[in-house]
Amino acid sequence: MSISDKTRKRLWAKSGNLCAISKIELVSDFTSVSDESIIGEECHICTRTPRGPRYNASLSEVELDEYDNLILLSRNHHKIVDDNPIYYTSERLQNIKKSHEEWVRKTLNFEIRNIKSKKYTDFTISFLTRIMTGRQLMNVISGSHAYDFDNDELHSESEVDLVSTFIQNAQELGDLFSDMESGER
């Protein structure tokens, strides 16, 4: 048996194209010198081989490739999970998957709700996301109405220059975005 297209689409959609553990994007953007790369893997929570991690003899061939037995991970986390089956039990992976998909749903619902209403007043920070791309940074900055920069203590003049330049650029971009329509961005 193999994973159906419908199951694949459901897994990638509910995972938000993000690794369930690290939350990194699993499809890298293409550049002028390279095609986009898919670094995500559809991973079995319980494996199909008796010597594999988290083998479950009670699962049928069909059940092995169903949505409930799959989790979307980066290649690195797939290897880590399979190399550590005592820590990454099937129950733990199910909980990671459920928690991640709930986080994706809440995050997307928040964004959609606020795009529709254009109100950001009910926003409270309940989690922080690692910003890995310029697009992610732009999405954060473009919805800001005020800035509160609090950073770790800086240890050198070059760190001060780097952080202050970044903060100044972020604030200027935020001010610029507030004057633009979404199509102009």
Image: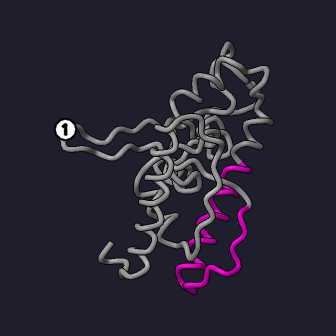
Is residue 130 shown left or right of residue 177?
right
Q: Residue furthest front?
A: 157
x and y percent of residue 75 in the render? 51, 29
Q: Quadrant of residue 124?
A: bottom right
Question: Between 121 and 150, which is closer to the camera in this rendering?
Answer: 150
Disc 1 element: loop
Residue found 61% across the figure and 59% down from its top: 149
Residue that appears at 62% across and 33% down = 44
Q: Nearer the viewer, residue 138 or 67?
A: 138
6 displayed left or right of 180: right
Magenta residues span 98-125
Q: Where is residue 178 shown, x and y percent of the image?
A: 43, 79
Q: Residue furthest bottom?
A: 117
Q: Is residue 81 above or below residue 175?
A: above
Q: Is residue 115 left or right of residue 47?
A: left
Instruction: Name the kind of residue labelled 1 in the image.
Output: Val
Q: Say which residue label 1 marks.
A: 33
Please tell me whether residue 163 is drawn above or below residue 136 in the rendered image: above
Magenta stretch secondary structure, dominant: helix
Magenta segment includes 110: yes
Identity of the residue drawn at 63% across and 19% down: 49
Look at 73% across and 50% down and name the residue there: 99
Residue 102 percent across, percent down from the top left: 70, 57
Q: For the C terminus, which image quadrant?
A: bottom left
Residue 60 in the image: above or below residue 130: above
Most distant residue in the left direction: 32
Report x, y in % for residue 34. Answer: 23, 37
Q: Residues within 10 Å of mark 1 (few under 14, many from 20)?
A: few
